[in-house]
Amino acid sequence: MTKKARALRTRMRRLVVALAGVMLLVVVGTAPAAKDTLVIGMPTDVPIFDTHKATGLHNGGILNQVSEPLVRLTPDGKVIPWLVESWQQSKDGKSWTLTTRKNVKFTDGTPFNAEALRFNLERFRKHSIGKATLAMVTGLEVTGEHTLKLTTEAPFAPLINSLGYHWIVVYSPTQVQKTGDDNVHTAPVGTGPFKLVHHKRGQEVRLEANDQYWGGKPKLRAIVSRPYPDQGARMLALESGDVDLIFHVPPQEAERLAKNSNLLVSTPSSARVIWIYLNVQREPFKDKRVRQALYYAIDREAIVKNIFAGTARALHSPGPVGSNGYTDRYDVYGYNPERAKQLLKEAGAGNLTFTLHHSPGRYLLSGQVVEAIQGYLKQVGVTMRVTDLEWGALSQLTAQPVDKNTVQAVLFGWRSVNGDIDSAIQDFGSGFWRPKGNNGSFWKSEEYDRLLTFEQGTLEGKKRLEALGRMQEILMDEMPALWLYGEPQIWAAKRTLKGVEWNPLESIQSLHTAHFED
Amino acid sequence: MLRLITSRLATGIPTLLAVSLGVFAIVRCIPGDPARLLAGDFATDQIVEELRGRWHLDDPLPVQYAAYLGGVLHGDLGRSITTSAPVLPELAERFARTLELAVAGIAVSALIGIAAGIASAVRRATVVDYLATALALTGISTPIFWSGLILILLFSVTLEWLPAGGSGTVRHLILPALSLGLFGAGVLARQTRSGLLDVLGQDFVRTARAKGLPERLVIVKHALKNALIPVVTVLGDQFGRLLGGAILTETVFSWPGMGRYLIEALSQRDYPAVQGAILVFAAAVVVVNLLVDLSYGALDPRVRAE
């Protein structure tokens, strides 16, 4: 080969290498993610960008960055004033004066005031599937630029907690009129720290900072939320750096992610509790000793430790741990298979067999929980058969009224929507039997009903707490359901992400102070 | 040709009508009430009733079907029960994404599958054949939810070359298309191999060889063209199915296609969304089948003559 040919060949080689390099850069080159954009990986897409019409609570945290709630709930059950700055209950307890925060504007310039609040509360009461939260409200009257009088049928003590339900938010009335009531989701305008740029269904939601935000200019410039329905893919997206924050980390994986020095795993309390309704109108659960025996036979702590890797919380009362009014004082049970056998013997319930209805995939790891319970019950001579039904079919079956309801036991998840134990246990009132309410136990106690009416109406905080305590005592003795555990909500994020706070309703609080640290 | 297209399209209309009626009936036979599902765990009976009224689920079934069909004829597939948004624009967007993924997936399948099949048939009972067969079987038997995650682990987490999921750019398309394509390639490789082996034993191939044609020409021009008809049938079938959405691939790669849409709609008993998605899917299958039939003519003049 001549010198010239060799030089040509070398040049060609260099050209090929350079071209390959350029192609590689074009194909795989990734620009470093700007650290003022937060990318969130959620299990599902936002169903519709109109909170009053939305159905998925887990995306409430994204929706709430645009349209804010009236007050905020913290994981330890506290209420923080937000768009409603203060409140006062009348002497007869039947009306509340809500004072709205001043100098707040919607992002279209419309002022937020008492009239805007009234408009939105009416809209929520008209459309939302969660409107039962405000079913007790009978009147809304604007009494001043910033004051709204809210009247209830009877005194309702946890009203302010209920206003923290994060679907009760405000949209600009001007914009609602402009888009039309059915199309608010196409261009929602709220008071929040972020504004909607676009919602590409199934792909992403993009928000940009609202620099006029009443709480100060947000530190982040943009938020992107993308659905990653596969939990494995969701975790890999975090590990690869595609996203900065993910929700619904499987408990077994939380430990592994926590070992990654770039990531931080958070397990704030969730308001969701899991229990098994026992139909007390049917055998074998007519005898309360049988119901108590089952509770003695199940090791709740072991379920939490082994199935949830310690991230869930065993229940010692029928409400979320830490909710207002919660007490574990009346849990006398503990894991005691011998006592369970003794009670079953006393009740004459030898060789007991019953069927549990369960919807696989509806609640976190519930399949494993059901298997564990089967094992525990087997040890005390009880055979629990399991009928797995898809959720749609199961909800139809369990919604039957008492005379047609043949379900003996069903695994069910319940969430206190307002951080107060009342919303978790009110359904054990006899007025809430299926299908009117969710009481699938068909259990009734006159004393309990009286206490329920009293605690919801009383203005005396101390007496109310006493009543809630007595109600829990009755439930723990009567055991119309087996209270198992509070589900964990597990989030994982890049360690550099700061200023994110959690909501017990499985969502994130306002992200106006969230930012990345170098 | 024109007659074939017209007659196939004409038979497509009753097919689609039958599909619309079938789906309408079947989704209503699935246990589970959309109003109760939408209302959630905490809803009272009154709210469930209200929702039923709002979505006309209380109307007699013939009235509901007539309203639905009337809408379809006016290009309106109704509003989704779950999101309240019109079904058609969302389906259009989803279908475009699905088409994108299906074309890319089929291209990968065809490229790898047909090449491996030819190599396997031509080098029958050699290391190449065994290797291609092993690869084909691996492709067929590897579940996508596993191969997909391995691809993400390798190309997104370890090498950091490609995004772990999502859509919008060509880079987002590479991994799902590869995952989908590798699965389909296995089937195609087997089909091409057996088709080609059949043809290679026939007289006209011997004649071609006897004429002294180069082997490459014998394989590509004579044998392969004849062996391709069943391969095209398989390709068409795969493509048709992919248009319905590759549910697992879409889930693993967070791809916003028809499959995920349909699954989510089904779990919520979102009747208008399910009906719309299946109708679009059925229409796509009718069109693909027509295209496959037309391609037979292009590949084999005898079919054209018939």
Image: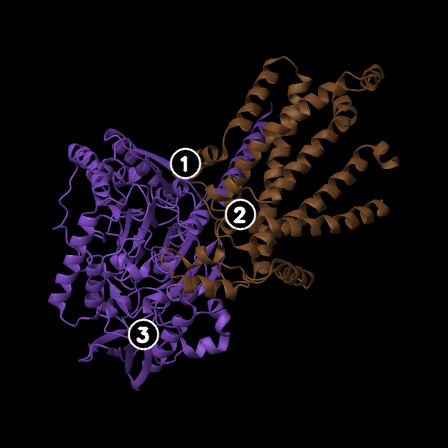
Chain colours: A purple, B brown
Q: Earlier in the sequence, mark 1 or mark 2?
A: 2
Q: Position of residue B157 (x, y in %)?
A: 39, 39
In the image, taking residue A291 as reference, residue A235 lies left or right, namely: right
Where's the N terminus of chain A, which quadrant? top right
Q: CA distance from mark 2 to mark 3?
A: 37 Å
Residue that badge 2 annotates: B30
Amino acid type at image mark 3: Val
Q: CA distance from mark 1 to mark 2?
A: 38 Å
Q: Numbered disc 1: what chain? A: B
One can see residue A490 in this view: no
In this view, the residue in front, B271 or A283, is: A283
Do the residues at discs 2 and 3 belong to one chain?
no
Q: Numbered disc 3: what chain? A: A
In this view, the residue in front, A359 or A19, is: A359
In the image, taking residue A69 as reference, residue A332 lies left or right, namely: left
What is the crowding at mark 2: few (fewer than 14 residues within 10 Å), some, or many (at least 20)?
few
What is the crowding at mark 1: few (fewer than 14 residues within 10 Å), some, or many (at least 20)?
some
- Above-or-below relation of A448 to A147: above
On residue A137, the disc is 3
Residue farthest to the front, as pictured = A348
Q: Position of residue B117 (x, y in %)?
A: 65, 24
In this view, the residue in front, A152 or B215, is: A152
Do the residues at discs 3 and 1 belong to one chain?
no
One can see residue B50 in this view: yes
